[in-house]
Image (cartoon, rainbow, N blue to C red):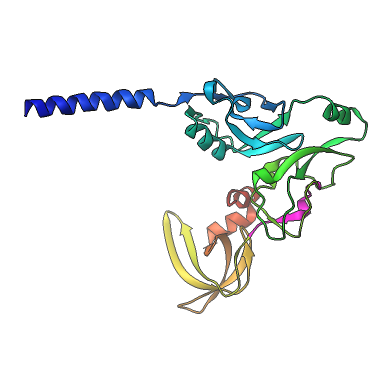
Amino acid sequence: MRMLRSFALAAALWLGAAAIAQAAIPVTLKAETVSADGVVTLGDLFDGAGSASGVRVAAKPGLSVVLDAGAVQQLARRAGLDWSNETGIRRIVVRSGASGGTAAAAARPGNVEVLTYARSLAAGDIVQPEDLIWAKAAMAPSDAPRDAEDIVGLATRRPLRAGSAVSARDVSAPQVIAAGDIVTLTYEAAGMMLSVKAKAMGRAALGEGFAAQNLTSKRTVQAVATGPGQAAVGPGADQILASPAARYALR
């Protein structure tokens, strides 16, 4: 028994030492993320990346590329790095540090930096961070977004060509409810929450209102889509319709 306890203690100590040896290296995101060549690496993004500096994160075909912070955090973790992201960053923009053609284009009058599509998209595609890059153009659309965050997660209204400038009218909230769908209506107020099943009488995107018929009472009510097969009614629905911030949070 004593030998067994000694073995268990030795195993515990060994496993503890192994865990320490495998602990991720803490790193911090650089204040300005710049890549000088055609790819983005962990060394471009983080101070203290060490031997993981050369791990490739993404290609950088334009003046800059937009990265999803969560995906970068997971990749860093697999490479043995620990980025805590305490400030809750959602997107990382890596700009080009190359000189030459890019600098010359920037120097020409009438050239502005605009958000463009990194690849061609079909109607109904959901825009992802890797679908967007910053590039130079003669002029920006009148409704050009100032931040990639305004476009990521939205659905394209029509086919879009790679390299074209992003316009707000290109996209809309993705449809999550179709006419005839059976949805769950949730009423929440004063700490109380009730849910019932209903039939959608029309289609709706996230944050949009639609009519729904209660399957039990056959009463038709106005609801607001909060996700696939999910909708809010009552004060919660009113708050979403009245607040742009609340509709944005649904994305």
Residue under the point 59% across and 38% down: 90
Vertical placement of residue 178 versus 163, above or below? below
Is residue 112 something that shows in the picture? yes
Left or right: 202 as drawn, with respect to 97: left
The magenta segment is 164-174
Left or right: 199 as drawn, with respect to 18: right
State the image coordinates of residue 229 (x, y, percent, origin top left). 52, 65
State the image coordinates of residue 139 (x, y, percent, origin top left). 88, 41
Magenta stretch containing residue 11, yes or no? no
Vertical placement of residue 238 versus 21, above or below? below
In the orientation shown, which residue stands out farthest toward the right? 109
State the image coordinates of residue 82 (x, y, percent, origin top left). 48, 28
Residue under the point 39% across and 26% down: 22
Residue under the point 66% across and 43% down: 130
Quadrant location of the N terminus in the rendered image: top left
Vertical placement of residue 203 versus 86, above or below? below
Observer-nearest of 21 and 86: 21
Observer-nearest of 37 and 137: 37
State the image coordinates of residue 193 (x, y, percent, origin top left). 43, 59
Observer-nearest of 48 and 115: 48
